[in-house]
Image (tube, coloured by chain):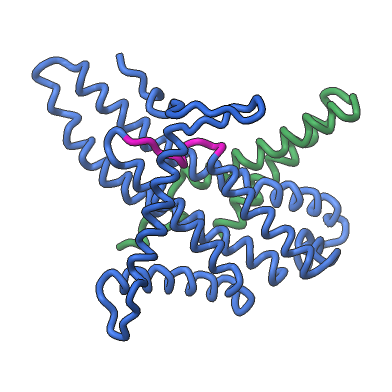
Amino acid sequence: MIQNKSKKTNPLNVATDLVAGILVGLACGFYLDKWLQTTPLFIIVCLMIGIAAGFRMIWREMNK
Amino acid sequence: MHNPLAQFEIKPLLSLNLLGHDVSFTNSALFMTIAVVFASGLMLFATRKQELVPTRIQMMAESLFGMIDDMLMQNVGDGGKQFIPLIFSLFMFVLFCNILGMIPYSFTATSHITVTFVLAMIVFLTVTIVGFVKHGLHFFSLFLPHGTPSWLAPLLIVIELVAYLARPVSLSLRLAANMVAGHVLLKVLAGFMVVMAFYLKIVPGPFIVVLVGFEIFIAILQAYIFTILSCVYINDAVNLH
């Protein structure tokens, strides 16, 4: 009965994994851009990597 | 109308100033202090007289310790014993902070991302430093799982690196978001009770009762999830999966 509310079924936890990946990707891209002066290139690339990383975290969580 | 976010305001209770920085004792600090006092008081009181046939409170302390010990044994194996103080302290602190937030008119210290981010960074830095000390530069093999085709390897390493860096963010954000969502929902429903017409005033009542029960469950569950994810990250560092 307590297994029903395991950590897999709480959608807020899954959503925070995705959001955290996106936030870290954005932060990395933004600071890389500020350091290297190449405006929006790194933001876009790192945002896509961040989205991929977020999905990878969710995938690994679901397949545990 | 009541602002449902006003409960998360930080109010300084005792204004102190250290070399130009504001280090006042706030209501957040007060509740964190109360949580630490309760947690250590409980453990100290329970282990005063160690009897072979344990009293009830000694049994409670022993079962808490046994749960953390089992968690580390299952997730990390034999190398996990050295992390019991860290994981136990984290678990007790987060648990008591969450539960103290359920008292009416109190303040949930773990609802602020500053608090949870520091806790998550403690775990992340410990795990990374232990990984580097134990494995040296071989620690970077964590980012390349078995059996990936070599054309995929560079992209996968970058994605794994970002996912590794996103771990403290997700750990902290999960705890803070769960606490904030629960308390804001309770405040919004309570606001409905104040504003609604006379014959509808009683309707949100049962929902609030059920939600308070659910919130207490979520408080304990989020403390458990925080701890068990820390154990998983320790396992990743100590035995490179």
Location of residue B201 in the rendering, given as x and y in whole percent from the top left corner = 14, 22
Hey, which residue is sitting farthest left in the picture?
Answer: B199
Instruction: Specify whether B41 is left or right of A54.
Output: left
- Which span of residues is magenta-colored? B106-114
Q: Quadrant of residue B50?
A: bottom left
Residue B112 in magenta stretch: yes
Question: The C terminus of chain B appears in which quarter of the rendering?
Answer: bottom right
**Residue A50 visible:** yes
In this view of the protein, which residue sits in the foreground, B202 or B67? Answer: B67
Give the color of chain A as drawn.
Answer: green
Location of residue A32 in the rendering, given as x and y in whole percent from the top left corner = 84, 33
**In this view, B86 is above or below B19:** below
In this view of the protein, which residue sits in the foreground, B239 or B200? Answer: B239
Instruction: Specify whether B198 is left or right of B227.
Output: left
**In this view, B38 is above or below B49:** above
The residue positioned 25% from the left and 76% from the top of the image is B55
Q: Quadrant of residue A29?
A: top right
Label tally: 0
**In this view, B117 is above or below B26:** below
Residue B165 in magenta stretch: no
Give the color of chain B as drawn.
Answer: blue
Instruction: Specify whether B14 is left or right of B116.
Output: left
Location of residue B6 in the rendering, given as x and y in whole percent from the top left corner = 39, 23
**Residue B148 visible:** no
The residue positioned 37% from the left and 73% from the top of the image is B62
